[in-house]
Image (tube, helix red, strand yellow):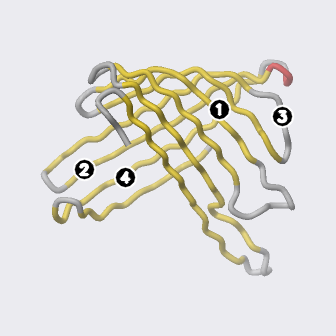
Amino acid sequence: LYTRWHQFILTPEINYNQRKAENEDVEYTNNLLRGIFIYNLNLSYFFKPYHKSQIDSLVRKVNELRPTIMRETIGVLIKGDEIEGKLGLGFEKHIYDPIQKPKYGFEIILNLNKKFLNFLTLESNVDAFLSKDIEKGGVFNIRSEIKNRILFKIIDGLSIGLEHKWYY
């Protein structure tokens, strides 16, 4: 949803896969339930302030726990023709299973969208949150997600893609 000055983006995501090992234990290869809300203020094409709210949880409980992490950041989006980046300040907090104090830090998001041919596009995304845990003696924490995707365009509005995601 957007107007000339405002843009609202709501992105729900469920990434869930499981498999059974030889000893019949269930192993979750992906168990992510995520909701992201982004607000952009369209001041210009190249420079946009933004606010991002993100909640990560699990689809199914693991060890009778369902940890839930909330991230709130504000920052600036800088956009080019093929690359855009966001740099923000904010916090991450475990709000359920267990409840913890917030960790303050920086959010860095880089998006590359490179078109090689009329039908072939490479998309690469990096989303990282760097924080310092003062309670643990100043240990640095990083939560990151890297996505790479190759898209083959069949017709306008219809593409086939191959995607790889990595979480840390």
Q: CA distance from mark 4 to mark 1?
A: 23 Å
* Residue 153 position within the rendered picture, expressed as x and y whole percent measured from the top left: 21, 60
- The residue that disc 3 covers is 100
Looking at the image, which is closer to me, 63 or 45?
Answer: 45
Residue type for callout 4: Arg
Q: CA distance from mark 1 to mark 3?
A: 16 Å
Q: Position of residue 60 (x, y in %)?
A: 73, 64
Of badges 1 and 3, the one in the foreground is 3
Q: Amino acid at mark 3?
A: Gln
Relative horizontal placement of residue 88, taking residue 110 as reference (left or right)? right
- For the point 35% across and 38% down, the residue is 2
Label 1 and label 2: CA atoms lie apart by: 29 Å
The residue at which mark 2 appears reads as 121
Give the mark, 3 or 2, whose residue is nearer the N terminus.
3
Separation of disc 3 and disc 4 at Cα?
A: 35 Å
**Mark 2 vs mark 4, CA separation in Å:** 8 Å
Question: Which residue has dot 4 on it?
Answer: 149
Residue topped by disc 1: 142
Counting from the top left corner in percent of width and height, residue 69 is at: 71, 42
Q: How crowded is the residue under tag 1: few (<14 C-alpha within 10 Å), some, or many (20+)?
A: few
Of labels 1 and 3, earlier in sequence is 3
**Circle 2 sits in a helix, a strand or a loop, which is it?**
strand
Q: Nearer the viewer, mark 3 or mark 4?
A: 3
Circle 2 packing at 10 Å, graded few (<14), some (14-19), many (20+), is: some
In depth, the one of 105 and 157 nearer the eye is 157
